[in-house]
Structures are given as C-alpha cells and as structure tokens.
Image (cartoon, grey):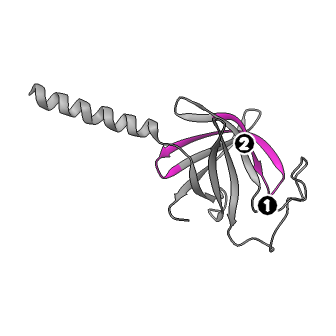
Amino acid sequence: MLKQTFLACLLIWAGAVHLFAQTPVGKWKTVDDETGETKSIVEIYEQQGKLYGKIVKLIDPPEPNPVCEECTDHRKGQKILGMVILENMEKEENEWNGGKILDPENGKTYRCKIWLENKDQLNVRGYVAFLYRTQSWYRVEGE
C-alpha cells in the first residue's frame, strides 16, 4: 500500500513539474477572439531572459506585404511580416507579464500577460487600464 501511494505521489509530482517546465517558446497560430479567424503565425523566442514574439506568417492578408499604417511608434510604415509584436515578457511563477503587445490592425500597444492553458494553448491578454481582452493562440508543429 505504501509503495502504491509513493508511486501515485511521484506521478503527480512529475506531471506538475512537467507543466511548470513548459514554455511558450515556439510558433503559435493566432486566432481573432471576435471573429474566430486565424490571422497569423507568431514565433515566440527568448532573448536575454525575456520573451518576444514576431509575426512569421500572415494568413490571407488583405493585401500583399501589408504595413502598419496605424502604428504610432517606430513600427509605423514597417511591414507587418517579421514585425515584433510581443516584447519584454518576464516569467513570474506560471505566467509571463510586464511586457507589451501590439495589435497591428489598430496600431495600439497594450500591457500584456500570457500563460499556458496547456502545452498547446497559450492565453494572451492585453490590458488598457482595468479593461482587458484575451485571445487563445494554438501551438503550431513543424511550421
């Protein structure tokens, strides 16, 4: 009986360690939370201990090689493909926050928090004051 209890505890602990060891580094399919449409593939990468994300593929863009006309910072007029839209995300327990995310459609930048719902679903939340909007992004394998 003690052996079975120990084995069960070990399996639970191993599962918890695996969940906390997961990382959002990789490629993610972005899905518009209002329309349900797939918009792009974003590659999240780590640089100097922080997470960043850049658009590596656009799905059915309204025009070839669109640029961010609505952006008000250094990205104004830059091509959206290859643009860094997620920056300076720091790990805090089982989420990453403290950074910002850009919506290239409206050019607005939001405070951001991201966390893994599971190994294949990333929740991305943008904030303005106390209001927020959350999208679910889905891991892309072999893209």
| Quadrant in which the C terminus appears | bottom right
Please name the residue shown 83% across and 54% down the image. 106
Three-letter amino acid code at the position of disc 1: Ile
12 to the left or right of 82: left
Residue farthest to the left? 1
Please name the residue shown 52% across and 43% down the image. 23
| Dots 2, 1 in contact, CB < 8 A | no
Residue 54, image quadrant: bottom right
* Circle number at residue 14: none
How far is mark 2 from mark 1, CA to CA?
15 Å
| Callout 2: SS | strand
Please name the residue shown 65% across and 34% down the image. 97
Residue behind mark 2: 87
Q: Earlier in the sequence, mark 2 or mark 1?
A: 1
Q: Which residues are magenta?
A: 97-121
* Circle number at residue 80: 1
Of helix, strand and loop, which mostly describes the magenta segment? strand
